[in-house]
Amino acid sequence: MSEKVCSHHKSKKKKAVRTCLAVVAVVVFLALLTILIVWAVLQPKKPRFSVQDATVFVLNVSAPNVISTTIQITVLSRNPNSRIGVYYGKLFVYANYNNQQISYYTVIPPTYQGHKDLNIWSPFIYGTNVPVAPYNGLRLAQDQSAGAVRINFKIDGRVKWKVATFVSGRYHLHVTCPVTIPLPGSPGKPAGVVVGNNAVKYQLSQTCTVSV
């Protein structure tokens, strides 16, 4: 008699566990479905970046395979979403010339960008005696002689999306800003404004490509 009672209790216990698991699965499914529906309705858009100006302090080739750079850029970031906020983690800014990094990483601190908000950052990007491939040193010298240098300013980091009280997981953010810097005295190029000893500021307004 006791064995039948025990087996009956075990059966009820298993049934309760299965019911509980089924309820949890339904709740999780409905929560995920709600998030997906909200996400589809809101249609999140990537942040938009652009470089507004660049101030060149140093840009020279001290040897065929050594480049020194000090440039301050003004970066504009815009959140195009009307219902979604953006959390930026640390952003790392650096300069690339002809597919080779020519500066150290400059860090932009974490920040939050609200709906339709605009952020402006002005990081200094620099590298002292950075070794490069010899052909890049020669090419930079040639570009300087020609009167214009094309540099890709890159921003790498992570972002989170905020919808009401929901905050998403982290996504990788990759921004590339191709900028052509006209050098002083370049014929047919917009003149820069001298802002200090050997420093020239150029108005650019160059759009960046963004990948999330």
Image: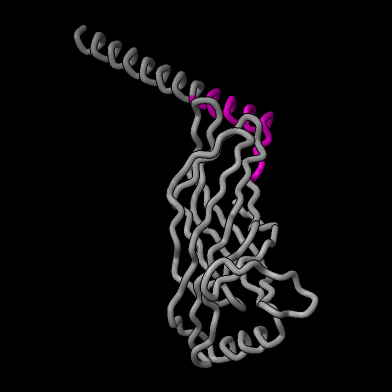
**So how many labels did they put on this image?**
0
Q: Residue furthest right?
A: 188
Q: Can the viewer see residue 101?
A: no
Where are the magenta residues, as a range?
28-46
Judged by its main secondary structure, the magenta piece is helix
User: Which quadrant would the N terminus be assigned to in this image?
Assistant: top left
Residue 5 x/y as whole percent: 25, 8
Residue 140 x/y as whole percent: 61, 85
Q: How is the image coloured?
A: one colour
Question: Would you place residue 210 above or below residue 60 in this image?
Answer: above
* Residue visible at 30% across and 11% down in the picture: 8
Residue 59 x/y as whole percent: 55, 78
* Residue visible at 51% across and 76% down in the picture: 69
Q: Is residue 199 left or right of residue 18?
A: right
Question: Would you place residue 109 above or below residue 187 in this image?
Answer: above
Q: Is residue 146 left or right of residue 34?
A: right
Question: Would you place residue 161 above or below residue 77 in this image?
Answer: above
Q: Can the viewer see residue 163?
A: yes
Residue 126 in magenta stretch: no
Residue sitting nearer the eye, 104 or 164: 104
* Residue visible at 64% across and 28% down in the picture: 37
* Residue visible at 53% across and 64% down in the picture: 72
Residue 159 x/y as whole percent: 51, 46
